[in-house]
Image: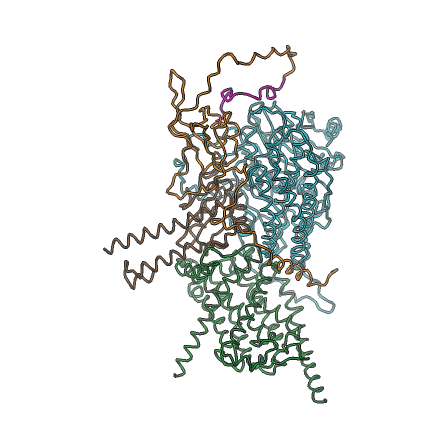
């Protein structure tokens, strides 16, 4: 961030601003719905539907990968789809996260015996949170997002602890 | 204080007004759309989700801003500015009250239309420079729509100017004071065809549903803003909302009597210094609320249907209505002189 | 469904000098075996001759150990008869394309050639349909699936970079994947939307001088790719556009090919249910019902009356929830967010009911050969009555908010018009066919479960455009609500499942069972060899035929239209790619 | 048009406006949780009898019934007493499709579907966990010979050719009666 050029790596201003940006990063996760199969109906449509309403948590649907922070892989990834997943992941701007939603995206699920299916999307892109379920309930997806928010917080804390330890 | 300092202070006031407006409008949109769709809208971040938009803006600030390799760098970098600055400049002429305008321009209305016509240029630059088929299509649509509807929008505003007798927005508002037949406020909304024509062409001009072809999520991925990320996308997003505010403010000024309350004499209002601007903004937000109800319900019109609507219906009828109003005013003047 | 008499068929075939073995197979119907050389003349005789089998229900392959049996399942609606023409091809032989006789076979032929290692000739677009280069023919008995220890130790799988660059090349290699979309042969006959026709100029004005018309505009190949907000799943449409107008279109599918048919050959008969759920994941109840019906026909198990009534009740609940997931996003494609959320509000209550009875929200595993898994709970009974009360009020509201809206009508009216012949030629079934004026509904014409005891009308419209398809499906939702009311009131007593063994081993045989799923006739062609898993299970996807009809209807529309047209055909990629 | 052109649009906006005043049905998930119906299928859990030891008799019926190899049991059988000791009964939750087939085929009700759906894990946590680890398998209760049911009367001699479908004959097969495992 430009701020650390001004005030050096471990000044309180840098740490405070990093914490502020971390809270902002957690509280406004825009997801690029990558609805492949049945999980898309449950995880993207119902979760942003009237009863479970992702908008409450600041999670918002953006169609283009350029404007999204989280990629929800909702469905089975097979060999024809893997290059598309990889390319979309590369197109997303940097603080990006991947949520592997459902059994098929986490480990290949009910179709992992078939040679054309990739056994888990973590073979193609680094995954942050796995959500078991086939399809997981919308609450399970929201619980997955809460776990993702905690993970982002933990990452920033660990980075700042590293910065603080340098300063002493 | 010398002239330069005042100019900078007024500019900062306009910028602050625009940013605050953008933040409040984005929050209001998500809340109104939520309530319209039987759900809650932002709740978890801050009390009733009030901190949601600040968090969004902060996140957009902190995101990486990739410039794709195959992009025309200069235009790609300049486009958000060319879209953002005109909608900022349009704030200058808005009549918050007799004394509270940032600059009381004698040709306020003309200035706003002139400034608003630069935006399609910015959108074209954004769409074409990002070397993406989707944004090219979005940009072509936006230019096709907004250039077409400059003319009917202006023609629909002219009857009001003729009735008020001046292009200065402050005078237009003052001309609407008083009441007709003791009960009905003397607003220009009663000139209903002008209102309808102005409203429809204004919707197309600012890219509101049902005419949001430029940024049609369901067809062109994210319209002309497909390749933009982080704060550049923030600028485009913000300018779209400030266009809505300007359009609603114009509606209120031209047809709903600016900062005046229906049965309260203007002098009593301006006695309390800060009341007129507050009234003006509240009335604009009520109009924006109705725009949001439209945004949450109506489907999108196809591009060729919209252009057909523009050239075959809006333009001829707004010209015809301009003539009819002229005749009516002449007739009423002759009657007034006769009595 | 009567069975055609074999003597008439063998007589007609002898008339044209084709030696065919016509026999009556138990539980299936009349099978006519023909040599590959005269398969074309046989099919032409079946279609144009007095036999009048004008409808290709399905076209698929069965690997019989020493050769590939290509099965043409034909149907004559006038006489309500089915016939199966089986043509035996050697491994790796050449499959001659019959698209000029039955255009419905355009995509199934490509899939069959690719899955059974045959080469395709005479086809306008002989490309791989579902898999990428380097994939072996999966449905042959020889090709292996992953063994148990490879599946259990996931970390051993390593993704080689070249695996990520697999292309989809043609079955004849020279056509590059990024070439312009192949010209579909049947553009003219199918769709002529008037919206884009050059309007006739008023009198006195004549067209601009000819020089202006030869305006050379550069064509753009736009890939409405697997990740697009409104392709309803992972469908890639390669559009060739001139400005906003679509000139050529080609659908690339296979991004969700999970090998349901191949995995079914290793699953037990009870485990087929969960596998078939994930095919058409919006109407899983119907997919399960089709498999159970096929297994019951083989086992000759008699399903008790209460189980049949429960099957109708759950099927109709699932039909409404499936139409809802079509109606919401179709409104979203046209641009209006409102109806999408109002309609999903009703779907939330339906999923509560389904979860209360079956335990799952979308994947039920509820219908078993012999009946259903569990009985209806009293709370579910109360919930259904409460749901019906406000659903009837909401359905009129949701109908009015979108269908009554002039903008939506202007967007949907005379878009993607299918004539009755065009729809039949392309093998459309269900709502898409009834919107084009042909009144065929599996629930009424080939009744199964308790539908004979239900009283319901089948909505039909005649103008065949996108608006008619929406109108037909909305009326279907109202009919389903009526049927649910009848089911709840008249649920008969009795047990909810027949006595069936834990591990089913149906006797060797072959059968076909069809069900009216929300998207059309969903059929399961089951070949059993006496072991506890099916020898071959063919899953007839009604939406594959809708997709190829949509692909033909796209040229001539605008981009905004193409999105809404494909939405109105209501297809689900899980079922198309299987 | 039977109605004037614009009324459809105004009517649809009226309906939307009516919905504006309806009570939103949102369930604020982390704060309010929906209580699920009793049959709802969540994660698979082992069941225990009242003394607290598992009902599972390590008969591997569930491991064979699961179509996706989600369950895995490592057994050690004591050669002379034939007593089975379950070392590790791992359940790969991220691959399970929650279909309930294992719970149905288990003859001793040793498995059950809980209503647990909050199973998300970050990439540092393992995707499978063990249901039962290092515990003795339950032993079938000793049946004293007295109350063994009288042997069923021999069914009358069936005509030789009626190939009575094998399926409808044996429905109460015990778990060990299963023949080949189709893995």
Image x and y of residue C417, in percent? 68, 51
Q: In the orientation shown, which residue stands out farthest toward the front? A: D50
Where the C terminus of chain C falls, by quadrant? top right
Image x and y of residue A49, in percent? 55, 51
Nearer to me, D168 or C541: D168
Which residue appears at 53% of the width and 75% of the height?
A: B112
Quadrant assignment, res D54: top left
Colour of chain C as rendered: cyan
In this picture, residue C460 sits left or right of residue A41? right
Q: How is the image coloured?
A: by chain
Colour of chain B as rendered: green
* Residue D125 in view, yes or no: yes
Which residue appears at 67% of the width and 53% of the height?
A: C399
Image x and y of residue B152, in percent? 62, 72
Which residue appears at 63% of the width and 16% of the height?
A: D163
Magenta includes C192?
Answer: no
Overall secondary structure of the magenta stretch? loop
Image x and y of residue D145, in percent? 50, 12
Q: Which residues are magenta?
A: D164-183
In this picture, residue A48 sits left or right of residue C212? left
Q: Which chain is brown?
A: A
């Amino acid at each position: 961030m430009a701020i650390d050029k001004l005030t050096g790596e471990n000044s309180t201003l840098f740490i405070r601003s990093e914490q502020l940006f971390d809270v902002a990063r957690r509280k406004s996760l825009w997801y690029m719905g990558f609805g492949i199969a049945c999980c898309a109906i449950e995880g993207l449509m119902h979760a942003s539907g009237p009863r479970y309403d992702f908008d409450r948590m600041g999670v918002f649907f953006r169609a283009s990968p350029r404007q999204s922070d989280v990629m929800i892989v909702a469905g089975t990834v097979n060999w024809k789809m893997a290059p598309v997943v990889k390319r979309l992941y590369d197109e997303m701007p940097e603080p990006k996260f991947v949520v592997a939603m459902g059994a098929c995206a986490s480990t290949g699920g009910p179709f992992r015996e078939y040679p054309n299916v990739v056994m888990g999307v973590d073979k193609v892109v680094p995954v942050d949170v796995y959500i078991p379920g086939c399809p997981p309930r919308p609450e399970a997806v929201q619980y997955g997002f809460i776990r993702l928010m905690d993970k982002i917080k933990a990452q920033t804390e660990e980075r700042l602890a590293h910065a603080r330890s340098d300063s002493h | 204080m010398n002239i330069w300092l005042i100019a900078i202070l007024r500019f900062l006031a306009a910028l602050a007004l625009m940013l605050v407006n953008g933040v409040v409008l984005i929050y209001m949109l998500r809340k109104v759309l939520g309530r319209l769709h039987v759900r809650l809208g932002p709740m978890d971040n801050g009390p009733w989700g009030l901190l949601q938009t600040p968090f969004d803006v902060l996140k957009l600030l902190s995101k990486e801003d990739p410039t794709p390799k195959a992009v025309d760098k200069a235009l790609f970098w300049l486009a958000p500015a060319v879209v953002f600055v005109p909608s900022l400049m349009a704030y200058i002429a808005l009549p918050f009250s007799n004394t509270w305008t940032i600059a009381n321009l004698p040709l306020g209305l003309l200035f706003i239309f002139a400034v608003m016509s630069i935006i399609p240029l910015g959108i074209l630059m954004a769409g074409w420079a990002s070397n993406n088929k989707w944004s090219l299509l979005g940009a072509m649509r936006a230019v096709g729509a907004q250039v077409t509807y400059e003319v009917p929008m202006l023609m629909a505003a002219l009857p009001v100017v003729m009735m008020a007798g001046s292009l200065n927005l402050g005078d237009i508002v003052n001309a609407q004071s008083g009441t007709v037949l003791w009960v009905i406020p003397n607003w220009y909304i009663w000139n209903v065809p002008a209102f309808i024509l102005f409203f429809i062409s204004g919707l197309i001009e600012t890219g509101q549903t049902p005419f949001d072809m430029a940024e049609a999520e369901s067809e062109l991925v994210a319209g002309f803003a497909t390749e933009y990320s982080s704060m550049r996308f923030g600028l485009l997003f913000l300018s779209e909302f400030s266009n809505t505010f300007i359009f609603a403010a114009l509606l209120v000024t031209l047809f709903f009597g600016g900062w005046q309350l229906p049965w309260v004499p203007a002098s009593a209002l301006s006695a309390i210094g800060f009341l007129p601007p507050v009234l003006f903004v509240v009335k604009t937000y009520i109009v924006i609320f109705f725009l949001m109800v439209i945004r949450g319900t109506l489907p999108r019109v196809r591009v060729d249907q919209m252009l057909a609507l523009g050239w075959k219906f809006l333009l001829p009828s707004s010209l015809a209505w301009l003539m009819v109003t002229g005749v009516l005013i002449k007739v009423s003047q002759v009657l007034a002189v006769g009595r | 469904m009567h069975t055609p008499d074999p003597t008439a068929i063998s007589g007609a075939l002898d008339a044209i000098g084709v030696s065919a073995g016509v026999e009556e197979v138990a539980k299936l119907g009349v099978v006519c075996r023909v040599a590959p050389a005269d398969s074309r003349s046989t099919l032409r005789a079946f279609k144009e001759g007095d036999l009048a089998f004008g409808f290709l229900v399905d076209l698929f392959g069965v690997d019989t150990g020493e050769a590939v049996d290509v099965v043409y399942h034909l149907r004559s609606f006038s006489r309500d008869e089915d016939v199966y023409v089986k043509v035996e091809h050697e491994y790796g032989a050449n499959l001659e394309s019959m698209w000029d006789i039955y255009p419905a076979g355009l995509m199934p032929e490509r899939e069959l050639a690719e899955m059974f290692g045959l080469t395709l000739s005479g086809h306008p677009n002989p490309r791989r349909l579902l898999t990428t280069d380097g994939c072996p023919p999966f449905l042959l008995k020889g090709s292996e699936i992953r063994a148990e220890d490879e599946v259990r130790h996931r970390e051993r799988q390593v993704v080689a970079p070249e695996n990520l660059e697999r292309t989809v090349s043609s079955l004849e290699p020279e056509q590059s994947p990024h070439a312009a979309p192949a010209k579909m042969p049947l553009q003219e006959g199918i769709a002529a939307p008037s919206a884009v026709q050059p309007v006739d100029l008023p009198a006195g004005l004549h067209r601009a001088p000819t020089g202006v018309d030869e305006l050379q505009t550069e064509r753009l190949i736009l890939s409405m790719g697997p990740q697009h907000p409104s392709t309803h799943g992972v469908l890639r449409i390669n559009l060739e556009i001139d400005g906003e107008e679509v000139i050529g279109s080609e659908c690339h599918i296979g991004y969700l090919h999970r090998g349901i048919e191949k995995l079914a050959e290793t699953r037990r008969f009870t485990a087929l249910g969960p596998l078939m759920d994930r095919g058409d994941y919006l109407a899983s109840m119907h997919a399960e019902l089709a498999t159970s019906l096929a297994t019951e026909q083989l086992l000759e198990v008699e399903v008790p009356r209460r189980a049949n009534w429960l099957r109708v009740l759950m099927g109709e609940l699932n039909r409404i929830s499936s139409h809802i997931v079509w109606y919401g996003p179709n409104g979203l494609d046209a641009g209006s967010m409102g109806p999408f959320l109002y309609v999903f509000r009703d779907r939330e209550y339906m999923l509560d009911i389904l979860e209360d009875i079956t335990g799952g929200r979308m994947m039920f595993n509820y219908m078993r050969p012999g009946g259903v898994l569990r009985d209806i709970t009293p709370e579910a009974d109360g919930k259904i009555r409460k749901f019906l009360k406000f659903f009837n009020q909401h359905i009129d509201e949701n109908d009015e908010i979108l269908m009554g809206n002039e903008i939506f009508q202007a967007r949907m009216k005379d878009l993607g018009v299918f004539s009755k012949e065009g729809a039949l030629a392309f093998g459309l079934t269900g709502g898409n066919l009834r919107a084009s004026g042909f009144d065929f509904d599996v629930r009424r014409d080939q009744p199964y479960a308790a539908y004979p005891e239900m009283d319901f009308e089948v909505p039909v419209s005649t103008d065949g455009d996108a608006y008619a398809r929406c109108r037909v499906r909305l009326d279907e939702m109202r009919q389903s609500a009526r049927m649910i009311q009848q089911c709840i009131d008249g649920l008969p007593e009795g047990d909810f499942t027949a006595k069936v063994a834990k591990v089913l081993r149906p006797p060797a045989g072959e059968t076909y069972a069809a069900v009216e799923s929300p998207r059309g006739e969903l059929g399961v062609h089951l070949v059993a060899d006496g072991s506890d898993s099916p020898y071959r299970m063919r899953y007839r996807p009604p939406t594959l035929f809708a997709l190829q009809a949509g692909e033909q209807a796209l040229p001539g529309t605008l981009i905004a239209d193409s999105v809404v047209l494909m939405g109105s055909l209501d297809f689900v990629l899980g079922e198309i790619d299987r | 048009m039977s109605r004037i052109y614009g009324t459809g649009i105004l009517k649809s906006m009226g309906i939307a406006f009516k919905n504006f005043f309806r009570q939103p049905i949102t369930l604020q998930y982390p704060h309010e949780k929906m209580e699920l119906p009793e049959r709802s299928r969540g994660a698979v859990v082992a069941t225990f009898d009242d003394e607290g030891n598992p009902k599972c008799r390590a008969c591997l019926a569930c491991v064979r019934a699961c179509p996706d190899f989600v369950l895995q049991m490592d057994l050690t059988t004591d050669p002379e007493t034939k007593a089975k000791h379950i070392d590790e009964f791992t359940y790969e939750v991220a691959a399970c499709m929650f279909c309930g087939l294992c719970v149905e085929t288990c003859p001793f009700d040793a498995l059950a579907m809980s209503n647990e759906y909050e199973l998300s894990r970050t990439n540092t946590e393992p995707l499978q966990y063990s249901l039962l680890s290092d515990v003795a398998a339950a032993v079938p209760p000793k049946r004293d010979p007295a109350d063994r049911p009288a042997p069923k009367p021999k069914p009358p001699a069936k005509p030789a050719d009626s190939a009575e479908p094998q399926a409808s004959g044996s429905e109460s097969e015990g778990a060990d009666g299963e023949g080949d495992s189709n893995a």
